[in-house]
């Protein structure tokens, strides 16, 4: 079964593919677009190229029933969703070139009353910039399209559920566009849909993750202070959180992922003088990763002085958060790279139980690594690590509260 698609989804990554599968589950024909031909081939076989619970079943069913098809080029539809990366240029300046390229790719296909939505995390004003490009190239469509911005709000590892049940903020360039976008999402989403304008919706996404980054920075700063003050930071936070109006987060070895570690820069880049707290939080969380790497180097030297030999070291975890396979912007991966740069014939065991292989690191089973290593460095609080019985003669550096 194959019919003309109602929706074109440009970008089939961690958000685009689950969203395409969700729409297809609702018996709507989706034409997915990705520049990677391997991704396209994988999806058209009913398989997936990323790890996400329930996604494999959703994609397999959607492809089998003919509601989802992937290609490297777009086709004509009624609704176009832009879900492509927004990386950085030099000096942490956001790069919206992928959004622009995706927009230009569909320019010849657009027609009156079509719906164009950006979901990619974007600097404030991006939706209006794309509208200007569209109307400059297709002036006959001016005022006749529906253009909106709607950021995702999902947690890796629970995407398929949260896409359906989380509230969404939807902002159009005008009231008509907002209403059209609301009507589209109502078909698939059970969470509340909150109306606003495009600029506010863009800012809302950035503010949500910047707020979390600031809160994590406070916890990470506490961990630095407690290390110097010889105080157990985990106990301190647990006690402080007994206060009815205090809720301090848990420190870690930095901040990773393609949201919290990235989105604040979209604000700092455009408003450097006004975003002092946001910018400082980014500096603290980035510094925490460097600090952790230095702590490993110090432990290595202390072991060598005490025992007269080089230690073996287990670096436990590479993902940017517990119990997922996503290594994007991972502080644990940065620390592993930093530590290995200073390697001097020590034996290293690199552990990430959620992936089977890595292009750079040779991976070791977590139980084997914990058994063989002299120094065990917990970088990610994966569930598997919490059940380990660590011998008392091991040196343990716990940066994420595995053994708190």
Image (cartoon, rainbow, N blue to C red):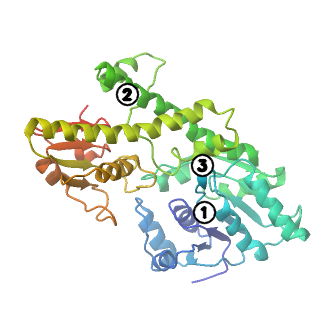
Give the percent coordinates (x, y) of residue 356.
28, 64
- Tell me the residue at 57%/84% (across/down): 1
Cα gap from disc 1 to disc 3, whole angstroms: 21 Å
Residue 232 located left or right of residue 59: left
Identify residue for label 2: 224
Residue 258 located left or right of residue 236: right
When the figure is inspected, residue 209 is found, relative to residue 78, above or below; the finding is: above
Give the percent coordinates (x, y) of residue 97.
67, 63
Q: Which mark is residue 91?
A: 3
Cα gap from disc 2 to disc 1, whole angstroms: 36 Å
When the figure is inspected, residue 174 is found, relative to residue 209, above or below; the finding is: below
Cα gap from disc 3 to disc 2, whole angstroms: 26 Å
Q: Which mark is residue 161?
A: none
Outermost residue, top side: 243
Identify residue for label 1: 84
Give the percent coordinates (x, y) of residue 51.
40, 62
């Amino acid at each position: 079964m194959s019919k003309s698609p109602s929706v074109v989804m440009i970008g089939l990554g961690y958000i685009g593919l689950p969203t395409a599968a969700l729409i297809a589950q609702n018996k709507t024909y989706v034409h997915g677009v990705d520049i990677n031909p391997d991704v396209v081939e994988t999806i058209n076989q009913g398989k997936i190229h990323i790890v996400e619970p329930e996604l494999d079943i959703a994609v397999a069913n959607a492809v089998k029933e003919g509601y989802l098809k992937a290609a490297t080029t777009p086709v004509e539809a009624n609704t176009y969703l832009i879900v492509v990366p927004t990386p950085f240029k030099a000096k942490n300046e956001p790069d919206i070139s992928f959004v622009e390229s995706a927009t230009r790719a569909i320019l010849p296909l657009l027609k009156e009353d079509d719906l164009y939505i950006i979901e990619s995390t974007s600097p404030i004003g991006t939706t209006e910039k794309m509208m200007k490009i569209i109307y400059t190239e297709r002036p006959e469509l001016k005022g006749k399209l529906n253009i909106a911005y709607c950021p995702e709000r999902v947690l890796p590892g629970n995407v398929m559920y949260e896409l359906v049940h989380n509230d969404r903020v939807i902002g159009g360039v005008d009231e008509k566009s907002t209403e059209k976008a609301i009507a589209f999402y109502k078909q698939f989403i059970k969470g509340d849909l909150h109306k606003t304008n495009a600029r506010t919706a863009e800012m809302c996404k950035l503010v949500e993750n910047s707020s979390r980054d600031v809160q994590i920075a406070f916890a990470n700063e506490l961990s630095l202070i407690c290390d110097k003050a010889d105080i157990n930071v985990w106990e301190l936070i647990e006690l402080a959180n007994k206060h009815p109006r205090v809720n301090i987060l848990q420190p870690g070895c930095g901040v990773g992922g393609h949201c919290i570690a990235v989105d604040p820069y979209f604000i700092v880049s455009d408003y450097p003088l006004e975003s002092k707290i946001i910018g400082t939080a980014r500096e603290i969380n980035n510094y925490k990763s460097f600090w952790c790497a230095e702590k490993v180097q110090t432990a290595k030297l202390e072991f060598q002085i005490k025992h007269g030999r080089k230690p073996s070291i287990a670096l436990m975890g590479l993902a940017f958060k517990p119990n997922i396979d996503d290594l994007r912007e991972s502080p644990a991966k940065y620390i592993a790279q930093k530590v290995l740069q200073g390697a001097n014939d020590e034996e290293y065991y690199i552990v990430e139980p959620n992936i089977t292989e890595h292009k750079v690191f040779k991976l070791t089973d977590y139980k084997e690594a914990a058994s063989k290593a002299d120094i065990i460095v917990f970088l990610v609080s994966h569930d598997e690590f919490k059940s380990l019985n660590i011998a008392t003669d091991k040196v343990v550096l716990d940066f994420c509260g595995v053994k708190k």
